[in-house]
Image (spheres, rainbow, N blue to C red):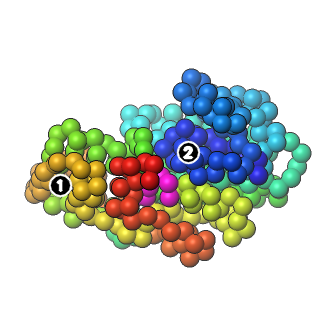
Amino acid sequence: MNLFVTGASGCIGSELLRRIRGRHALSVMLLEGDPASDRLRDEGAQVVTCDLGRPDADALEAGLEQVDTVVHLAGLVHTPDASPEAHRKINHEGTKTLIDAFLRAGAPRPKRFVFISTVSVFGNYKDGVYDEDDACRPDTPYGHYKLEAERELVRVALNNPALSYTILRPVTVFGANDRGNVGRMIAFMRRWRVFPLPGGGRNRKTLVHAADVAAAIDLVLDNARAENAVFVVGNEASPTLREIADSIRRNLDIRCALLPLPLGPLAAAPVARKLMRDNCYSSAALRTRLGFTPMTLDEGMRRLADPGS
């Protein structure tokens, strides 16, 4: 397989490259100046320099000439101050440019596009567990433009028989070099040695380790059962916020007090509302159809404490 991976030096991309090393001809797309460039070249990867906010379609097409499978991980994420326009340019228009360049590159042949989207496309409009059958009603620019990119990919594939796709929607991801919610939570606990639990931390969150997202990508790369399909990537267990904090303390050896706080006036604060919200998702389809077997929360935290394990 000739594989092209965007966002290859990120939290998930690094895990994916570690997992598939030596099994595929590999090209990667990185930003100018990415410190991983020289190392990946030394490991035999072809490196294409591109910024999806200002993509060079010709350079992309040249880099995709021999490629039969794209894994698209790159995007604008964990940037709460980014404008809707920035999300549109990178997460939607940048993805569209990549899809178009992939179709133009090389002779017509079966091609696969694996798009790493997000459960943010669902929004938050119901209590309970979301799965692939639920409607998408995103309530953030990030979720909105990721959904637009999904729709663009499906539309293009419907009009191009040579192109198939798989869309993966990871839940909250944690792992090495994580800049997301769990990474910030760990950094807060390490720095302040206390972590507030609005409402006692009884709300539930579905998490997944970046290595498990990489495993899911590996599962769908050349699998007919994943063709033209959408999967949530998560864990069937949805621990409470308190259980997550306890796992962090226990497995990362962080001495940190947990401080239950009454709801009261906290309920009006945006940060507290986010912490108190349930975010639960099912990856049963990925498990039953493709045999996906993610780590438990404690296993993931132990891997975070010892990335080489």
Tag 2 secondary structure: helix
The mark that comes first in sequence, 2 or 1, is 2
Q: Nearer the viewer, residue 134 or 211?
A: 211
Query: What residue would you read off at disc 2?
Result: 13
Do residues under tags 2 and 1 come within 8 Å of each other at their CB atoms? Answer: no
Instruction: Report if residue 173 is visible in the image.
Output: no
* Highlighted range, magenta: 207-212
Q: Nearer the viewer, residue 118 or 1?
A: 1
Q: Is residue 105 above or below residue 280?
A: above
Residue at 56%, 45% (x, y): give it: 13
Q: Nearer the viewer, residue 156 or 18?
A: 18
Classed neighbour count for the residue bearing mark 2: other residues with Cα under 10 Å, few (<14), some (14–19), many (≥20): many
Q: Is residue 231 above or below residue 213?
A: below
Which quadrant of the structure image shows residue 299?
bottom left
Instruction: Identify the residue at the far right of this view.
Output: 107
Q: Is residue 228 above or below residue 85?
A: below
Instruction: Report if residue 231 is visible in the image.
Output: yes
Query: What residue would you read off at disc 1?
Result: 197
